[in-house]
C-alpha cells in the first residue's frame, strides 16, 4: 500500500494527495506546521506539539477547523494506517484556497494535512563523530518582524542560512539574532556546556521553543546538571567545552567545531553523552 496522506478528514494515496495551487500556503507560505517523532508506534510529546501548532495558528489568526483532540486522533490514525513504527510526522495547516492577492479573509477553510513517513536521519556515525557547523551571515528574524516562535510555512529565513551551511560543506548553520547573540540553528536549538553548566538561549533570543529543547532541560534537572537559559555570543560557543543541537528529527546531535574552531577536545563530550543516553531512555529505544 502506498503512503496514505491525511487531507481534511480523508486519506489519499501519495499520488492523489493534492492541494490547490491557489492555496495561500503555497502562494505566500501562509500556514503553520509541526514536525513530530514516533517511537515504537507512539508519537513523542504529541500534546506539546499540538499546543505549539495551535499557538502558531493563533498568532497568524488561522482558525484550525478541528479540535485538538480530533487532531491528536487524526495524527494517531495516520501513524497506524501507514504502519509507522519509528518515523517522522508532518502536520501542516494552510490558510486555505484564496485568490492571487494577499488577503487571508478571502481564503477558504484552512487545509489540514498529515504525513506520517519513515525518517531520513543524519547518518548514525555523525552522532559519534559530531557535526561541524558554521555561523550564517543570515540573521535570525527579529521577533518583532515575524516571531521565530511561530512555526510558519515560511521557512526562508532558515533556508537562506541552510544554503550557507551546505555551501560551506556543513549540515547546519548557527544563526545570530538582531542583537548579535546566538539564537538557534536552521532547524535545531543549540546548547553549550562550560565548566559543567548547560546553557541554551532564552526564548526571547528569537527562537522556536523546541519540544526537544524542553525535554533536555527537564533531563538536566533530573540528572542534577546545572542548566540555565541565558543569552550568549558566538565567542561563548568558540570557547565552550561541549556543544550539541536538539530537534525532533535530529534528537541530540553533538557539535565538535564551529567556524573551523574545535569545540572542547573535538569529540562529543561527557555531559552531551549523558544527556543523549537519558534521552534515548525517555523515548524508550
Ligand atoms: N528551531 C527550529 C528553527 C526548528 O525548525 C526546529 C524544529 N525542526 C527546532 C528548533 C527544534 O524544535 P523541536 O525540538 O520541537 O523539533
Image (cartoon, rainbow, N blue to C red):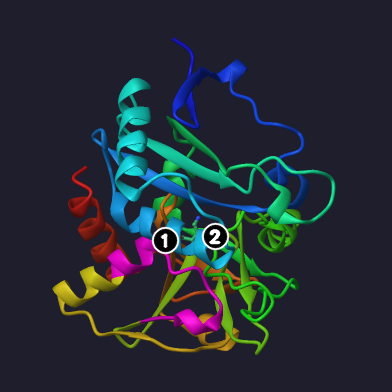
User: Where on the picture, by quarter, is residue 199?
Assistant: bottom left
Image coords of residue 218 (percent x, y): 23, 71
Identity of the residue drawn at 28% across and 64% down: 215
Q: Secondary structure at mark 1?
A: helix
Is residue 262 magenta-colored? no
Ranked by sequence position, the earlier of labels 2 and 1 is 1
Q: CA distance from mark 2 to mark 1?
A: 8 Å
Give the x, y percent position of residue 99.
80, 43
Q: Where 156 sits versus 238, above or below?
A: above
Asked whether disc 2 touches disc 1, contact meaning CB atoms under 8 Å apart, the reply is yes
Position of the N terminus, as image quadrant, is top left
Any atom of ligand 1 within 8 Å of the CB at mark 1? Answer: yes
Give the residues in magenta.
Answer: 199-216
**Camera-side residue: 121 or 71?**
71
Mark 1 neighbour class, 10 Å CA radius: few under 14, some 14 to 19, many 20 or more: many
Q: Which mark, by number, is residue 52?
A: 1
Q: Position of residue 171 (x, y in %)?
A: 61, 54
Amino acid at each position: 500500500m502506498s503512503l496514505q496522506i491525511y487531507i481534511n478528514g480523508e486519506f489519499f494515496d501519495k499520488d492523489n494527495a493534492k492541494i490547490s495551487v491557489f492555496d495561500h500556503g503555497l502562494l505566500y507560505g501562509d500556514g503553520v506546521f509541526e514536525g513530530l517523532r514516533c517511537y515504537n508506534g507512539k508519537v513523542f510529546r504529541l500534546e506539546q506539539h499540538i499546543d505549539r501548532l495551535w499557538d502558531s495558528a493563533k498568532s497568524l489568526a488561522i482558525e484550525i477547523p478541528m479540535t485538538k483532540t480530533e487532531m491528536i486522533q487524526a495524527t494517531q490514525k495516520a501513524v497506524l494506517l501507514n504502519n509507522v513504527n519509528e518515523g517522522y510526522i508532518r502536520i501542516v495547516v494552510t490558510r486555505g484556497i484564496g485568490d492571487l492577492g494577499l488577503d487571508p479573509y478571502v481564503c477558504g477553510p484552512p487545509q489540514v494535512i498529515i504525513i506520517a513517513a519513515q525518517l531520513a536521519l543524519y547518518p548514525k556515525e555523525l552522532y559519534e563523530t559530531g557535526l561541524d557547523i558554521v555561523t550564517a551571515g543570515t540573521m535570525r528574524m527579529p521577533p518583532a518582524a515575524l516571531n521565530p516562535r511561530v512555526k510558519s510555512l515560511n521557512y526562508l529565513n532558515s533556508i537562506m542560512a541552510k544554503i550557507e551551511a551546505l555551501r560551506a560543506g556543513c549540515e547546519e548553520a548557527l544563526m545570530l539574532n538582531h542583537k548579535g547573540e546566538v539564537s538557534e540553528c536552521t532547524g535545531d536549538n543549540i546548547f553549550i556546556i562550560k565548566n559543567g553548566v548547560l546553557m541554551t538561549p532564552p526564548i526571547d533570543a528569537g527562537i522556536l521553543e523546541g519540544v526537544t529543547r524542553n525535554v533536555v532541560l527537564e533531563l538536566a534537572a533530573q540528572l542534577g546538571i546545572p542548566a540555565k537559559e541565558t543569552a550568549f555570543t558566538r565567542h561563548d560557543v568558540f570557547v565552550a567545552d561541549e556543544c550539541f543541537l536538539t530537534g525532533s528529527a535530529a534528537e541530540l546531535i553533538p557539535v565538535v567545531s564551529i567556524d573551523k574552531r574545535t569545540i572542547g577536545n573535538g569529540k562529543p563530550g561527557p555531559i552531551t553523552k549523558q544527556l543523549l543516553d537519558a534521552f534515548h531512555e525517555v523515548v524508550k529505544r
